[in-house]
Image (cartoon, rainbow, N blue to C red):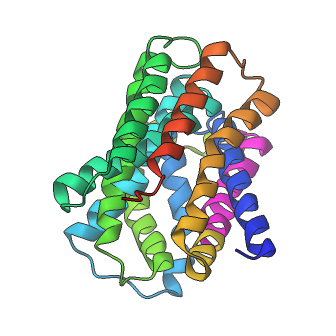
Amino acid sequence: MPLKHTLLAILVTIIWGVNFTFIKWGLESFDPIMLTAMRFIFTAIPLIFFVKRPKFNLVFMTYAVGTFAIQYGLLFYAMQLGASAGLSALILQIQVFITLFLAYLLLGESINRWQIIGLIIAVLGLGLIGINVGGDMPLLGFICILMSATGWSFGNIASKKLMGSSPLSLVAWGGLIVAVLMSILSWFLEPNTWTVSTFSEASIKSWLSLSFIVYVSTLMGFVMWTFLLQNNSASKVMPFALLVPIIGMFASVVLTGETMTWWKVVAMVLIMLGLGVSRKPVTD
């Protein structure tokens, strides 16, 4: 992979890793469902006026709801409950193994021994987090992030069936659907948030965080990542994604003061090792 592409891949992982801290800051002024809705309102508009609308069917709706509504709605809720940005970034990576399992069940794809070994190693790390719930990872938050990862995994499976569609079109129009759904849901579940005072009293930090989430993490990050995948083999690009939870944890420690304990370090090593092992190619 060319050096400039390598540097671009590193930049994307930094953006996506730091994004978890910006989510935490955004939640200081906006409730989680509302923040999810706003994220995709500003993502979809004005993009929908410039990209072709994909075919609206069950597969597309599964992609949109799983990837955007369930993943981010539950992630944001977990973080509002007190889940730290670093641990959230780490636990969310379990979606890799849930996707493998769903692909086996729903698409008939095979699972090799390295993926099974990687899953076992990663589950040990996940279990270590599970027995240390409390503080910066409440039990309900832990469960919500696991459900968030599951939603993302169903979105991944759906995306495999949407290979002929423009990725930018899927994000724009999928974002529009989720923006409407989450706005309605927020209106009923968070009735006191859609007020003038919510917007006028929101901190500059929260508004800047929302801008980063929408324009830097979602739009710029997605476009750059798609460019890399279109110009390099996936096997060369995807390993850079392993940097996201590491950067997410580091950014949370530096920017939010998250405490780095021994079990967090061990859990991170186990989950990252599991992810790395699962990507090992089968040679026989």
Q: Residue at horizontal 35%, vertical 82%?
A: 54
Q: The C terminus lies in which quarter of the figure?
A: bottom left
What residue is drawn where x is 44% and y is 59%? 179
**Quadrant containing the N terminus in the rendered view:** bottom right
Total number of numbered discs in the rendering: 0
What is the chief secondary structure element of the magenta stretch? helix
- Tell whether position 26 is magenta: no
Between 130 and 66, the one lying in front of the other is: 130
Q: How far across and down, in percent of the image, does residue 241 sit?
A: 60, 54
Q: Quadrant of residue 247?
A: top right
Image position of 111 (left or right of 271):
left
**Whole-percent x and y of residue 124?**
44, 23
Q: Position of residue 220 (x, y in %)?
A: 67, 68
Q: Is residue 21 visible?
A: no
153 on left or right of 252: left
Residue 20 image offset from top left, x and y in percent: 64, 41
Magenta part of the chain = 199-223
Residue 19 in sight here: yes
In the displayed structure, 229 sits above or below 280; it is below
Please say whether residue 205 is one of the residues in the magenta stretch.
Answer: yes
In the image, taking residue 259 as reference, residue 53 lies left or right, namely: left
- What residue sits 40% from the left and 41% below the top? 148
Residue at the front extreme of this rendering: 284
Nearest the eye: 154 or 274 = 274
* Residue sitting at x 34%, y 51%: 99
